[in-house]
Amino acid sequence: METYFESGIGTEIKMPCQNQQLNNNDRQEHTAMSSTKQVRFASCGNSVLTESNRDAEVAETCENVFNSELQRQIGSQLKLLPLNDQIRELQTIIRDKSTSRGDFVFCADRLIRLVVEEGLNQLPYSKCTVTTPTGHKYDGVKFEKGNCGVSIMRSGEAMEQGLRDCCRSIRIGKILIQSDEDTQKAKVYYAKFPPDISRRKVLLMYPILSTGNTVIEAVRVLTEHGLQPKHIILLSLFSTPHGAKSIIQEFPEITILTTEVHPVAPTHFGQRYFGTD
């Protein structure tokens, strides 16, 4: 909840001393300032909401209902990062056409890191016990071996560094898929994976899901190499409802992890990130 407190910053306020009372002019001035000068603080008490805040809350509620309904339709295979103000700000800056390329890349890298961290949280782990420097035993966990990343070129390569920052020695494969000029169908031009990819858990990286066709073709290539769709976790920043549904309908066992499902995806992402726009 949010509470608003009065502030007189930049304005002289006359305060009564001991038994001195406010005169009529002072009361009028104080009342006027109370209605116009407000500073926002986080609090657990009651909140005084402005009209814009109420509109924002209504919009957020509608979005939550939309996402819940979409997840109900698609199932548990679609996972959304819990929305907070930090993620919303990063999404806003990336979508803003006036954002400089430097700010765009900086915010994109931050959002990528959040998605990668949650993607790693979806991987299997086993319990282990270690000894601390003081000689005490600590019961913890460790990730099981056999994980790798695969980026769909070119925009997927923007997520590779974020994965390496979290897993320094992880192996990363690549797929190049482009739409055929005549048929508009996705066509594979290049694919290189670790030789034992059929036995690995794969973090498939592609930041923008628009139609889903590119990802569907990439998953087909991976399955042709012996990988089961249930061992694929798709890491994405933005997705459209159509894109997410198309992928899940084609491969019901795949897991999709994204920050937002919205009818309009920022398809300019790759050009802005690599400076080719």
Image (spheres, helix red, strand yellow):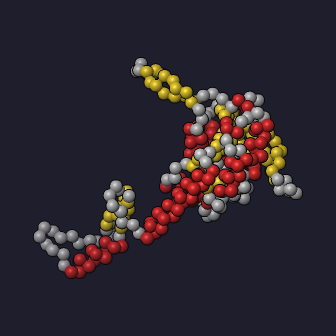
| Residue 112 in view, yes or no | no
User: In what quadrant of the picture does the C terminus appear?
Assistant: bottom right
Residue farthest to the bottom, as pictured: 24
Query: What residue is rendered at 64% in x and 43% in y?
Result: 255
Q: Position of residue 145 (x, y in %)?
A: 63, 27
Q: Position of residue 24 (x, y in %)?
A: 21, 81
User: In what quadrant of the picture does the N terminus appear?
Assistant: bottom left
Residue 4, picture quadrant: bottom left
Residue farthest to the left, as pictured: 19
Q: Is residue 110 above or below residue 3?
A: above
| Residue 95 in view, yes or no | yes
How many dots with numbers?
0
Query: What residue is rendered at 65% in x and 61% in y?
Result: 264
Residue farthest to the top, as pictured: 135
Residue farthest to the front, as pictured: 73
Image position of 2 (left or right of 183): left
Q: Nearer the viewer, residue 15 or 58?
A: 58
Image position of 171 (left or right of 52): right
Q: Is residue 253 above or below residue 4?
A: above
Query: What residue is rendered at 85% in x and 53% in y?
Result: 180
Q: Nearer the viewer, residue 197 or 161?
A: 197
Residue 210, picture quadrant: bottom right
Query: What residue is rendered at 15% in x and 68% in y?
Result: 17
Residue 99, picture quadrant: bottom right
Q: Position of residue 266 (x, y in %)?
A: 66, 58
Q: Position of residue 29 (x, y in %)?
A: 28, 77
